[in-house]
Amino acid sequence: MRNLQPTQPIGIFDSGVGGLTVARLIFSCFPAQEIIYFGDTAHVPYGSRSPQELIRFGDQIVSFLINLGVKIVIAACNTSSSVSLPFLQEKYDIPILGMVEPGVKAALQATRNKKVGVIATEATVNSGAYPRTMRFFDQEVEVFMQACPRFVPLVEAGKIKSPEARAAAAAYLKPLQKAKIDTLVLGCTHYPFLAPVIAEVLGPGVKLVDPAEETVKELATLLAEEEEAKNESTRPEHRFFASGAADSFYTIGRQFLGDLLFTVEQVSLNEEKKLPY
Ligand code: DGL
């Protein structure tokens, strides 16, 4: 493992704007820490992609971020965390953090009746990563998975409080209400954008868990020795990249992050490069 330098940026990636929900928490916890964010908007949504595609995208993005000098990568995407994280952690020698284990730990702390719902993309549900990890830590917990494929396009289009979002939430959450869950993991980084609508449908009896908080605690442990990351007097210039359309990314990002987001650079990663899988 390489030595982490305080001045090196942290890389964060997602299929689009979802990872900004993680980035925003990092900005507030580590105001002096420079971030390089990559939104793979050329390939969003990841939820309907195959494992091979997700591994290829993750590989290209991590390699791009490492070339820009990042010291840590956060796969701020549950789909990538569920499917490609083991490959990426094996291949690269810098720390790569994901969302699933943090989400599981936070849910197990929150639940009282041990009935936990997880809403996620189809690829995350199909991977089985959440129930597997949940049972690794607690054999007794019952996990109810629900794929919500309409959510990500709604968030990417900025329709977070629209009638469509409310209708989709009501339909997706019904089986979880029937199962009497007391805790719901927002198992996709796009979903915290919809948290108000989800909370309205479920009411106060169900606790919503955003894995980002636990992921940022893991990051805090890695950064613990770095005084510079905690120095609030310096305000770094973050960089944002999008592989596809940058305009809607900019509009939503700007609403969410304010003036922390100045510009979005469009970049296309080399699709032609043949990789061994
Ligand atoms: N935000 C990502 C996740 O956490 C990806 C969603 C998608 O592109 O389908 O799973």
Image: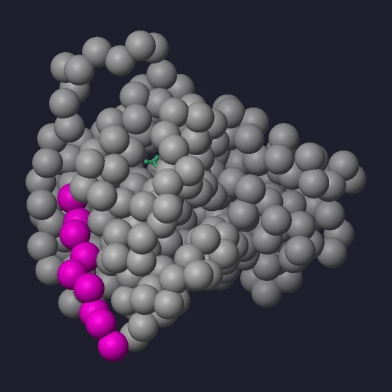
Q: Look at the picture and state if 269 lies above or below 197.
A: above
Q: Is residue 107 visible?
A: yes
Is 239 within the magenta? Answer: yes
Q: Nearer the viewer, residue 177 or 221?
A: 221
Q: Is residue 198 visible?
A: no
Q: Give the magenta-colored segment's residue range.
A: 233-241
Where's residue 165, x and y in %?
Answer: 41, 56
- Toward the bottom, the furthest residue is 233
Is 44 within the magenta? Answer: no
Where's residue 17, x and y in %?
Answer: 30, 54
Q: Quadrant of residue 110?
A: bottom right
Q: Quadrant of residue 207?
A: bottom right
Count of all numbered marks drawn on residues in the image: 0
Where's residue 133, x and y in %?
Answer: 71, 40
Q: Nearer the viewer, residue 196 or 20?
A: 20
Q: What kind of secondary structure does the magenta stretch mostly adopt?
A: loop
Q: Look at the picture and state if 170 lies above or below 135.
A: below
Residue at coordinates 34% horizontally, 24% vertically from top-left?
56
Residue at coordinates 68% horizontally, 51% vertically from top-left?
104
In the drawing, does residue 5 fall left or right of residue 85? left
Residue at coordinates 26% horizontally, 56% vertically from top-left?
36
In the drawing, does residue 16 fall left or right of residue 220? left
Q: Nearer the viewer, residue 45 or 273?
A: 273
- Toward the front, the furthest residue is 3
Q: Look at the picture and state if 181 lies above or below 233.
A: above
State ligand 1's quadrant.
Answer: top left
Residue at coordinates 22% horizontally, 73% vertically from top-left?
236
